[in-house]
Image (cartoon, helix red, strand yellow):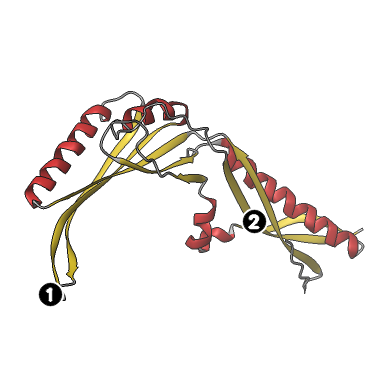
Amino acid sequence: MSEMSTSQTKSTATVSVRGFSRSSTEPDWARISVEYRRRSVDRDAAVQYASEAVQNFRDDFASSDLVRSLTIGQLSVSRERVYNDETRVYEDGLWGVSVTGRLEVDARNLNDVLGGVVIHPLEVDYVSWGIDDDNPLYRKVRRAAVRNAREAAEDFADGASMQVGDVIALADPELLDTAIRAQFDGVESMPMEMAPTDESGGYSPDISLDPQPVYVSATVEAVFELRQR
């Protein structure tokens, strides 16, 4: 998408355009988001089960060479309110306990780590893929966006029987809008609903996910000088 405007200030004509570029690459990392959930009539027992499950999970992965980072969230405890049809009032129900966690691993190690995750009594909510901040794809798409902007300026200049001169200004519109910027953070995610896969009600460690391509986009607003041919 390009927009054109011309102005005459001290005999200098300009054209304002917008350049865009989008490209993809293989991911650098993968994040596994997990959650432990437990319901029990006994609050203390539910909390104890959760603490032990999370500690075992931490012990297995905190020092693993395959894991970049491990984050465990806060423990949440709540009690259900159940409607009694006979008394027509709400009564206390089971206690519910939940804890969330996240593992970040190199993308190439995802399946090895995932196989170890699913043997724990935690649910895998989703897996997301992304690229590191120093991935060269970011620079590649920014430069391509500038080239795209110049091509648009040249098209407008040709239509006005002029030629493109020097760059007067370049701006990244996402810098001013965090909502827009979030669309270009180089992350692709895959929600997962993992049901028990063996006769004992546990999870099978034989899980293999293909890395998803990560897309990065860049937009630039540019102002070019226009010169007579």
Dot 1: element: loop
Residue 162 at least partly seen: no
Residue marked by disc 1: 87
Residue 106 at least partly seen: yes
Q: Which residue does the image show at 28% across and 40% down from the upper left?
A: 122
Q: Nearer the viewer, residue 229 or 136?
A: 136
Q: CA distance from mark 2 to mark 1?
A: 65 Å
Farthest residue toward the front? 86
Dot 2: element: strand
Farthest residue toward the top? 65
The percent coordinates of residue 62 (x first, y second) are 25, 30
Residue marked by disc 2: 220
The percent coordinates of residue 147 (x first, y second) are 73, 48
Q: Earlier in the sequence, mark 2 or mark 1?
A: 1
Q: Nearer the viewer, residue 90 or 65?
A: 90
Image: 85 above or below 142: below
Q: Quadrant of residue 121?
A: top left
Q: Nearer the viewer, residue 220 or 12?
A: 220
The percent coordinates of residue 85 (x first, y second) are 18, 72
Task: Specify whether 69 is left or right of 107.
Answer: left
Q: Amino acid type of disc 2? A: Val
Q: Which residue does the image show at 13% across and 47% down from the upper left?
A: 46
Q: Which numbered dot is residue 95?
A: none
Q: Quadrant of residue 78?
A: bottom left
**Structural crowding at the residue carrying mark 1, measured as other residues with C-alpha within 10 Å and reported as few (<14), some (14–19) or many (≥20):** few
The percent coordinates of residue 139 (x first, y second) are 60, 41
Q: Amino acid type of disc 1? A: Thr
